[in-house]
């Protein structure tokens, strides 16, 4: 009995701990890469999360963005761009790997928080109030959060998601962790990663040196053919098919095509700006891609509404030309 009480006390202490002490959702200020004035203030849940986590570690998230030059068109979507885990370790000494879930998710998370480690958990946006107007209480969607504080007793959660830091509680907490399940139900076993942070952060000079090596490495892995031209060839036909679906499907299609394209290259431009003034021309071309994708997203909505698809055939030409120019500039400079 005493042993059970001791284990319970340890679990409670762990659940009240926080990986980053002193962070409060009400006063949290997102990183500049999530400034509302940017073309794409939010990109995708995974890269947005790492931007804020690295910022909370007082590390430059711009350094990790060299991988953006590898984005390709995959036939039905642009690459869902994610920071390679090996890049995070090389740049910042952050080791991130899969966490096996064999018990209740919250027990695993509490254990890791108590050890100063951050858990990245795939959750259901239906129960996440920061997605108000998009997913919250409207539809079930898979998204990744990083849990900073878990309070099982108070049913509260502080977490990084998209471009910010938030809190949820009560029924949302219960729904997120599927606390209504009984022992007879199938267990809730989401994909989970956990990050171990170094005792001492690397110096900025070392980060910059590694970032240069990684940018050169990823540049050699760039698509052999212009991915935007490949997308442009099938874009009007795809949109005609999207127009036959319920209008809500438009948002899913746009997110996985134009938004991933535009957000990826806006971040690429930020990486070039951070990296060196010598890459300013490449940064300009990257932002042209981003601007074009934003503009074409509005054209896409109009085309679906009016059922006129012909103007889309050349809409992406400026972005395709900018991709060629950007890659040519990088080849000269790298």
Image (spheres, rainbow, N blue to C red):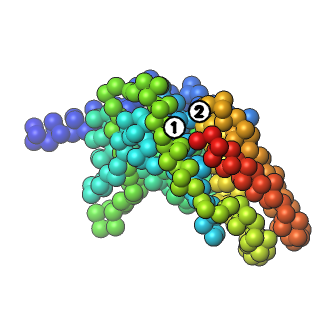
Where disc 2 sits, the SS reads helix
Badge 2 vs badge 1, beta-carbon distance below 8 Å? yes
Going from the N terminus, do you reach mark 2 or mark 1 first? 1
Where disc 1 sits, the SS reads helix
Q: Please give left or right for residue 316 compared with residue 173 in the image.
A: right
Q: Please give left or right for residue 32 compared with residue 208 in the image.
A: right
Q: Residue at x 63, y 47 (%)?
A: 331
Camera-nearest residue between 93 and 281: 281
Q: Is residue 44 visible?
A: no
Residue 80 picture location, percent across and down: 57, 57
Residue 265 position (above or below residue 61): below
Dot 2 alpha-carbon crowd within 10 angstroms: few under 14, some 14 to 19, many 20 or more? many
Dot 1 alpha-carbon crowd within 10 angstroms: few under 14, some 14 to 19, many 20 or more? some
For label 2, the residue is 275
Q: How many marks?
A: 2
Camera-nearest residue between 128 and 89: 89
For label 1, the residue is 212
Residue 119 position (above or below residue 250): above
Residue 146 position (above or below residue 245): above
Camera-nearest residue between 139 and 263: 263
Identify the image quadrant of the N terminus.
top left
């Amino acid at each position: 009995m005493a042993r059970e009480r001791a284990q319970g006390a340890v679990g409670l202490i762990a659940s009240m701990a926080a990986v980053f002490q002193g962070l409060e959702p009400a006063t949290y200020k997102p990183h500049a890469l999530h400034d509302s004035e940017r073309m794409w203030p939010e990109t995708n849940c995974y890269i947005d999360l790492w931007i804020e986590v690295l910022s909370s570690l007082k590390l430059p998230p711009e350094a990790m963005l060299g991988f953006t030059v590898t984005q390709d068109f995959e036939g039905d979507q642009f690459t869902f761009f994610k920071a390679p885990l090996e890049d995070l370790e090389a740049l910042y000494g952050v080791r991130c790997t899969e966490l096996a879930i064999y018990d209740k998710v919250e027990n695993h998370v509490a254990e890791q928080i108590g050890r100063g480690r951050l858990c990245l958990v795939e959750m259901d946006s239906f129960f996440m109030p920061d997605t108000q107007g998009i997913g919250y209480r409207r539809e079930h969607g898979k998204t990744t959060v990083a849990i900073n504080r878990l309070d099982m007793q108070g049913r509260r959660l502080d977490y990084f998601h998209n471009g910010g830091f938030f809190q949820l509680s009560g029924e949302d907490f219960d729904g997120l962790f599927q606390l209504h399940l009984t022992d007879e139900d199938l267990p809730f076993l989401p994909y989970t990663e956990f990050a171990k942070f170094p005792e001492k952060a690397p110096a900025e000079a070392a980060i910059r040196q590694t970032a240069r090596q990684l940018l050169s490495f990823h540049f050699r892995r760039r698509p052999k053919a212009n991915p935007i031209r490949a997308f442009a060839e099938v874009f009007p036909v795809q949109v005609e098919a999207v127009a036959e679906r319920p209008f809500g499907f438009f948002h899913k299609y746009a997110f996985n095509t134009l938004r991933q394209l535009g957000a990826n290259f806006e971040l690429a431009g930020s990486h070039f700006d951070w990296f060196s003034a010598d890459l300013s021309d490449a940064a300009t071309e990257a932002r042209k891609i981003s601007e074009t994708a934003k503009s074409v997203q509005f054209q896409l909505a109009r085309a679906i509404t009016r059922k006129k698809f012909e103007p889309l055939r050349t809409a992406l030409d400026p972005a395709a030309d900018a991709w060629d120019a950007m890659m040519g500039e990088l080849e000269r400079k790298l």
